[in-house]
Image: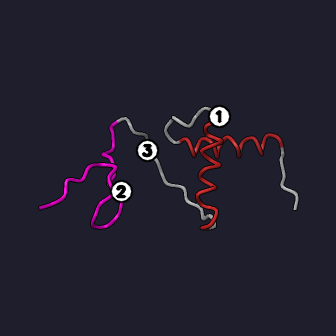
Amino acid sequence: MAPDIHPGDTCPTCSRRVPFPKKSTSPTTKPIAYRAPLNEYEAHLEVIDAVAELLGVKSEPFHRYKAISYCAAAVLLHGLRVEE
């Protein structure tokens, strides 16, 4: 008998999250990927989420994308540089 698996659940066979069905109102998207050091991965996501919370976009779709985009725009606008 097959287990009763719902969208958002983790599949007991392959350990992957079962995706939610795409809504007709969902925008077309494309994934963006970059690598982060394994020991800093969780902290990195926490920082992005904290920025999204500060910007007031945490509850919106694509909140991490918006937080990173706002930060990149601020750096470009103000000419900020990291001194080594």
What amino acid is labelled 1 in the image?
Leu
Q: Earlier in the sequence, mark 1 or mark 2?
A: 2
Dot 2 alpha-carbon crowd within 10 angstroms: few under 14, some 14 to 19, many 20 or more: some
Q: Position of residue 18 (x, y in %)?
A: 32, 54
Q: Which residue corresponds to mark 1?
A: 55
Magenta highlight: main SS = loop
Along the viewing direction, whichever of 59 and 29 lies nearer the viewer = 59
CB-based contact (under 8 Å), mark 1 and mark 2: no
53 within the magenta span: no
> Can you give x and y, in whole percent of width and height, for residue 62 in the image?
52, 42
Could you tell whether 27 is left or right of 18 in the image?
right
- The front one of 84 and 42 is 42
Query: Callout 3, which amino acid?
Result: Thr
Given residues 3 and 78, the one toward you in this image is 3
| Span of residues in magenta | 1-24
Tell me if residue 6 is in the magenta stretch: yes
Q: Is residue 34 above or below residue 6?
A: below
Q: CA distance from mark 1 to mark 2?
A: 29 Å
Tag shown at residue 20: none
Q: Secondary structure at mark 2?
A: loop
Percent position (x, y) of residue 33?
Answer: 55, 59
Dot 1: element = helix
